[in-house]
Image (cartoon, helix red, strand yellow):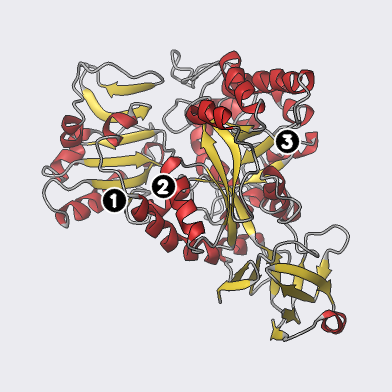
C-alpha cells in the first residue's frame, strides 16, 4: 500500500473536492482524506511518501490524439515554423544528412502563418534543396501535403492525373501539378512511402510515453488505424503499455465490426474499443472544411463534403446494430449540420429498435451554424473539442470565415446548452500538452498575448475548473470509463499527476510552463 500525504489534492469529486492524503493499493484508490484516518485503514506494509505540499490532480486524458502519427512524428522534420524559409532550411539540413533516394519526411507547416495571403508553397522549392530525395511534408492540419517532384514521380502523379474522390491534386494556372495534395490525394504519395513495421510503431509509442507522462497525460483516445491497434495490443500483451487507451476504429471497418459483433467498451482497463470514426469534411487550413457559404474571397469554394447525413446514417445504423457508438470528424458548419441530421435519425433508430442510447461524438465542432448549436445537447451528443485549435487558427478563421468566426470554437456555447464536453489536442496537429489547451480555454490568447488582453471572442472562455473537467471527467464519460477514471475517489484507478504549483492559484499565463513533476499510473510511479 502507498500513502501519499501532506499534499494539496484536487479530487474533482463534487462530494469531496479536496484532501491532504490518498491511500493506494492494487492499482486503485482505497480512500482520500486526512493522513491519520487513512493510516488507520492501512494494513500490511505501508509505503509513506511526504508530498511536501505539492498539488495532486487526477491524470489528464487527451480525448483526441493520433498516437501512431504523433509517436512516429517525433523523428520527422519539425515544419511548424514562423517562415517558409525556416521550414526549407530544416528540410535542407535533413536532406544533406540523408542517403540519396531516402525519404525526407516532415510535419507541421501552415501556409496561413507564412504570408498574409496564405500562398501555397510549391514542389520546385523543395526540388532546389533536395534534388536527390523524395520529400513529403504533411500540413499541420493533416489535411494537406507538400511534395517535391521526385516524390510526385514515384507516385506516378502527372499534370494529367485525375483527382481522387474527396481530394484534389492542386494545379497552377497552366494546369501543372504544384506539389500540394489535398485530402484523399495525399494518399497518392503517402502510399508510396515504405510503411513502418508494427515493431517500429511499438518502439515509437514507447519513446512517446514518457513525453506524454511529463505533460500530465495518463490516458488517450486514439484515432489511428489498424497498425496502431496492433502495436497497442502487442504493448499491452507485454505489459509495456503505460497509458489508458480508448481505441476508435475507422468507418471502413464497420462492416467487419458488425459481422464480428464487436461493441463499444470491449477490452480491459488499459485498452478498450471506443467508437467508429468517420470523416465528414476537411479542415480550415487547406480550405476544405465543408461550409454553407463560400470561403471569404473564394466565391466558388465551399470546401469538401465527403457524404451527406443520409449516407452517414447508413454507417451509423450498422454500428448501432451491434452496440458501437459513432464519432465523426466535422469542422465546417455544413459538415456539423449533416452529422447532426444523421444523429437525429440514429436516435430515432435506437429508440424504434430497442437499442442502447450510445454516447456518440462529434470531433472538433469547429464552426457551427447558430441554428444547430443547441442540437448536440438535445441529442446528447458529445462535443469532442480541442481548445488549442482556437488560438492556433484564430487569424485564419477570421480571414477565411469572416463573421462566422464568432460561432467557432464555441466551448462556452456548448457547455451552456448542456452538451457533454471532452478536450484533446488532435496531436500531431497540435501539441498534446493539455496545459497549453487549458491556457487556450481560459484565456483565448496565444502565448504572446495576442490578439488582446481579453482574448479572441472572450465570451467563449471557460473557467479553469470547467476546462480541467473536460480533460478528466468529460474525457472519461466520452470513453465510457467514468466509473473508473476522471477523479480521485474510492475504488477508482490510481492514475494521478503531481505539480509543483496549484493551477487554481497561478496566473493563467503560467499554465503554459506547467508540467508534471511526477506521474502515477495504476498505482505505480512511471515518472518521478
Label 3 close to label 1 by CB (< 8 Å)? no
Label 3 residue SS: helix
The residue singled out by tag 2 in the image is: 69
| Disc 2 crowd, CA 10 A, few/some/many (<14, 14-19, 20+) | some
Compared with 36, 446 (above or below) is above
Q: In which quarter of the image is residue 136?
A: top left
Rendered location of residue 207, percent (x, y): 41, 63
The residue singled out by tag 1 in the image is: 86
Quadrant that contains the N terminus = bottom right
Label 1 residue SS: helix
Quadrant that contains the C terminus = bottom right
Rendered location of residue 494, percent (x, y): 69, 66
Disc 1 versus disc 2: nearer the observer = 2
Rendered location of residue 481, percent (x, y): 70, 50
Rendered location of residue 126, percent (x, y): 20, 40
Label 3 close to label 2 by CB (< 8 Å)? no
Structural distance between the alpha carbons of marks 1 and 2: 23 Å
Amino acid at each position: 500500500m502507498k500513502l501519499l500525504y501532506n499534499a494539496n489534492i484536487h479530487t474533482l469529486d463534487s462530494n469531496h473536492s479536496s484532501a491532504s492524503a490518498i491511500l493506494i493499493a492494487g492499482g486503485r484508490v482505497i480512500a482520500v482524506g486526512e493522513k491519520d484516518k487513512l493510516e488507520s485503514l492501512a494494513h500490511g506494509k505501508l509505503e509513506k511518501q511526504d508530498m511536501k505540499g505539492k498539488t495532486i490532480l487526477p491524470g489528464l486524458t487527451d480525448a483526441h490524439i493520433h498516437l501512431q502519427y504523433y509517436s512516429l512524428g517525433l523523428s520527422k522534420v519539425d515544419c511548424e515554423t514562423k517562415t517558409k524559409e525556416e521550414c526549407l532550411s530544416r528540410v535542407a539540413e535533413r536532406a544533406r544528412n540523408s542517403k540519396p533516394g531516402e525519404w525526407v519526411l516532415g510535419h507541421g507547416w501552415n501556409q496561413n502563418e507564412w504570408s498574409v495571403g496564405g500562398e501555397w508553397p510549391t514542389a520546385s522549392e523543395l526540388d532546389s534543396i533536395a534534388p536527390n530525395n523524395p520529400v513529403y511534408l504533411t500540413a499541420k492540419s493533416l489535411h494537406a501535403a507538400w511534395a517535391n517532384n521526385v516524390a510526385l514521380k514515384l507516385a506516378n502523379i502527372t499534370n494529367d492525373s485525375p483527382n481522387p474522390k474527396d481530394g484534389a491534386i492542386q494545379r497552377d494556372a497552366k494546369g501543372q501539378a504544384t506539389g500540394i495534395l489535398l485530402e484523399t490525394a495525399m494518399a497518392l504519395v503517402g502510399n508510396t512511402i515504405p510503411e513502418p513495421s508494427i515493431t517500429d510503431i511499438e518502439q515509437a509509442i514507447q519513446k512517446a510515453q514518457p513525453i506524454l507522462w511529463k505533460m500530465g497525460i495518463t490516458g488517450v483516445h486514439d484515432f489511428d488505424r489498424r497498425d496502431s491497434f496492433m502495436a497497442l495490443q502487442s504493448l499491452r500483451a507485454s505489459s509495456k503499455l503505460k497509458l489508458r487507451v480508448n481505441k476508435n476504429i475507422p468507418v471502413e471497418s464497420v462492416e467487419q465490426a458488425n459481422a464480428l459483433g464487436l461493441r463499444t467498451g470491449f477490452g480491459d482497463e488499459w485498452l478498450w474499443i471506443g467508437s467508429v470514426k468517420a470523416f465528414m469534411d476537411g479542415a480550415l487550413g487547406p480550405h476544405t472544411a465543408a461550409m454553407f457559404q463560400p470561403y471569404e474571397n473564394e466565391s466558388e469554394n465551399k470546401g469538401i463534403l465527403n457524404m451527406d447525413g443520409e449516407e452517414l446514417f447508413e454507417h451509423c445504423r450498422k454500428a448501432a446494430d451491434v452496440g458501437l457508438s459513432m464519432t465523426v470528424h466535422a469542422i465546417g458548419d455544413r459538415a456539423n449540420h449533416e452529422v447532426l441530421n444523421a444523429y437525429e435519425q440514429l436516435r430515432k433508430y435506437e429508440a424504434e429498435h430497442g437499442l442502447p442510447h450510445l454516447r456518440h461524438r462529434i470531433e472538433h465542432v469547429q464552426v457551427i451554424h447558430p441554428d444547430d448549436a443547441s442540437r448536440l445537447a438535445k441529442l446528447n451528443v458529445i462535443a469532442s473539442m480541442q481548445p488549442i485549435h482556437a488560438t492556433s487558427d484564430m487569424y485564419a478563421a477570421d480571414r477565411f470565415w469572416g463573421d462566422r468566426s464568432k460561432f467557432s470554437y464555441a466551448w462556452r456555447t456548448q457547455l451552456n446548452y448542456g452538451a457533454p464536453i471532452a478536450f484533446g489536442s488532435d496531436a500531431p496537429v497540435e501539441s498534446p500538452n493539455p496545459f497549453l489547451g487549458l491556457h487556450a480555454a481560459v484565456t483565448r490568447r496565444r502565448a504572446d498575448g495576442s490578439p488582446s488582453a481579453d482574448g479572441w471572442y472572450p465570451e467563449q472562455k471557460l473557467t479553469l475548473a470547467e476546462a480541467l473537467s473536460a480533460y478528466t471527467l468529460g474525457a472519461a464519460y466520452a470513453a465510457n470509463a467514468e466509473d473508473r477514471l476522471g477523479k480521485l475517489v474510492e475504488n477508482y484507478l490510481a492514475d494521478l499527476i503531481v505539480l509543483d504549483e496549484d493551477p487554481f492559484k497561478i496566473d493563467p499565463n503560467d499554465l503554459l510552463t506547467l508540467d508534471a513533476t511526477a506521474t502515477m499510473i495504476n498505482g505505480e510511479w512511471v515518472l518521478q
